[in-house]
Image (cartoon, rainbow, N blue to C red):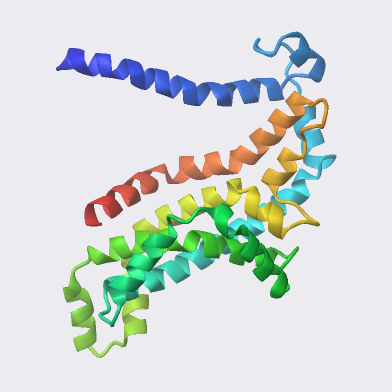
Amino acid sequence: MPMFKRLLSLPMAVIAFTCLYPLFFTLNNALKTNKEYILDRFGLVSSPTFENFVQAWTRSRLSEYFLNSVTATVGACLLLILLSSMAGFALAILRFPLRRLVFIAILASLMIPVQVVLVPFYKTIIAFGLLNTRLGLILSYTAFFLPFSIYLMTSFYAGLPRELTEAARIDGCSYPQIWWHVIFPLGKPAMITLGILNALYCWNDVLISLLVLQNERTLMVGIAALRGEYTTNVPLLCAGIVLAALPIVALYLIFQRQIVNGIATGAVKG
């Protein structure tokens, strides 16, 4: 058995290397000058410089794009947690006609590719006057990521003992009071996981933000714009990628235990 575990660790080590090497390659080249990169693309940096980070943050306006990304991501995540918690409570705890049909329709919407609905989505954004607004981007992220969020929260709440809601009803609590005082606090592990996953989706999005914010940009769209039409300053591009990845990496390092526990809990209870 120990020999089998050692053999199994070899392909896992290869997979880990393929995941870590692009991060090392990006950070290593971000510390090079453009001349040093051209002369030796894969070699270790000899004279580290932070000029690329300064130039990407100031001259390339990544600081402005960073604010747009933070606003859209935080706003969408908070709205998604609130709405999906309420919908998950209704679908998992309450009993009303066509409840299963509604849940199946939500699951079916997960199978629809984003590209299929881009034209009606864009027309809707224009019709409601949400084009080139941060509110429009927040609502867009909420609409696209809400089905998965509802599914996750419904699966989690379905595993909670029904005696909790029945006891609260006997004590005279209304359904909104049960959700706020009983169900919502118990759903924190799933909500933390949901918030981090949605933050990843919103932060890394390019397509939706490119359609909604046309006069301004989010961070990922701004980084994509660092690529030139004929030539690209690769160290500058790598510096922008590192700056964009730092908040997400920090978020994962801080909440990695909650992510694992939340996913495991949702999988067992689902």
Is residue 119 visible in the rendered structure shown here? yes
22 relative position to 196: left or right: right
The answer to which of 47 and 148 lies nearer the viewer is: 148
**Which residue ends up furthest to the right in the rendered image?**
59
Placement of the C terminus among the 4 image quadrants: bottom left
Is residue 188 visible in the rendered structure shown here? no
**Residue 110 vertical placement versus 42 (above, below):** below
* x 40%, y 69%: residue: 85
Number of on-image labels: 0
| Image coordinates for residue 138, horizontal then vertical, percent | 61, 63
| Image coordinates for residue 176, horizontal then vertical, percent | 37, 83
Quadrant in the picture for residue 1: top left
| Image coordinates for residue 171, horizontal then vertical, percent | 22, 88
145 relative position to 246: left or right: left
| Image coordinates for residue 18, horizontal then vertical, percent | 48, 22
* x 31%, y 80%: residue: 178
* x 70%, y 51%: residue: 218
**Residue 43 vertical placement versus 125 (above, below):** above
Quadrant in the picture for residue 153: bottom left
123 relative position to 55: left or right: left
**Residue 110 vertical placement versus 220 (above, below):** below
**Residue 153 vertical placement versus 64 (above, below):** below
The answer to which of 173 and 104 lies nearer the viewer is: 104
